[in-house]
Amino acid sequence: MANTTNFSVRMDKDIKKQCETLYAELGMNLTTAINVFLRQSLRAGGFPFDVTINTPNAVTIAAMEEAERIVHDPSAKRYSDVEEALGELKR
């Protein structure tokens, strides 16, 4: 038998349930998934994925820049309320 040990982790009950469902669909239980994560961490020499502050992706950045241009463009179409804007979209 392998040389194993136990460890406990406190986590949100809903997150645990969602992860158990996800990993079951992948054919493994939560223990196996955690072991995969830990082994990948050793191979990567850290987290096996990027850990970042929520930085927008290129598409989001482009949309934000477009919105900024529109705000400062005096010739951009303006709407007095949401209903007016939605009406324009329905045409």
Image: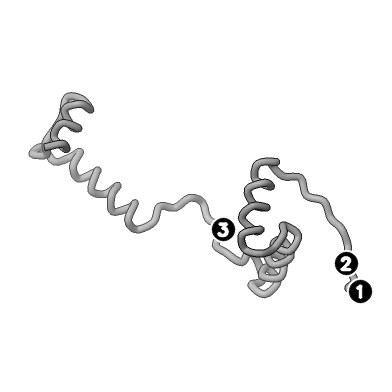
Residue 90's place in the image compared with 24, above or below, is above
* Res. 26 image quadrant: bottom right
Q: Quick one: SS at disc 2?
A: loop
* Res. 4 image quadrant: bottom right
- Residue located at (65% from left, 66% from top): 46
Q: Which residue is mark 3?
A: 51
Q: Position of residue 8 (x, y in %)?
A: 82, 51
Q: Type of residue at label 3?
A: Val
- Residue located at (72% from left, 44% from top): 11
- Colour mapping used in the image: one colour
- Residue located at (70% from left, 41% from top): 13
Q: Residues within 10 Å of mark 1 (few under 14, many from 20)?
A: few
Dot in front, 2 or 1: 1
Circles 2 and 1: CB atoms closer than 8 Å = yes
Instruction: Indicate which disc, 3 or 2, sits on the residue closer to the N terminus.
Output: 2
Q: Position of residue 14 (x, y in %)?
A: 65, 41
Q: Quick one: SS at disc 1?
A: loop
Dot in front, 1 or 3: 1
Q: CA distance from mark 2 to mark 1?
A: 8 Å
Q: Residues within 10 Å of mark 2 (few under 14, many from 20)?
A: few
Q: Quick one: SS at disc 3?
A: loop
Q: Residues within 10 Å of mark 3 (few under 14, many from 20)?
A: few
Query: Could you tell me which quadrant the C terminus lies in?
Result: top left
Q: Which residue is mark 2?
A: 4
Q: Position of residue 71 (x, y in %)?
A: 20, 38
Horizontal side of 65 relative to 20 (left or right) equals left
Q: Which residue is mark 1?
A: 1
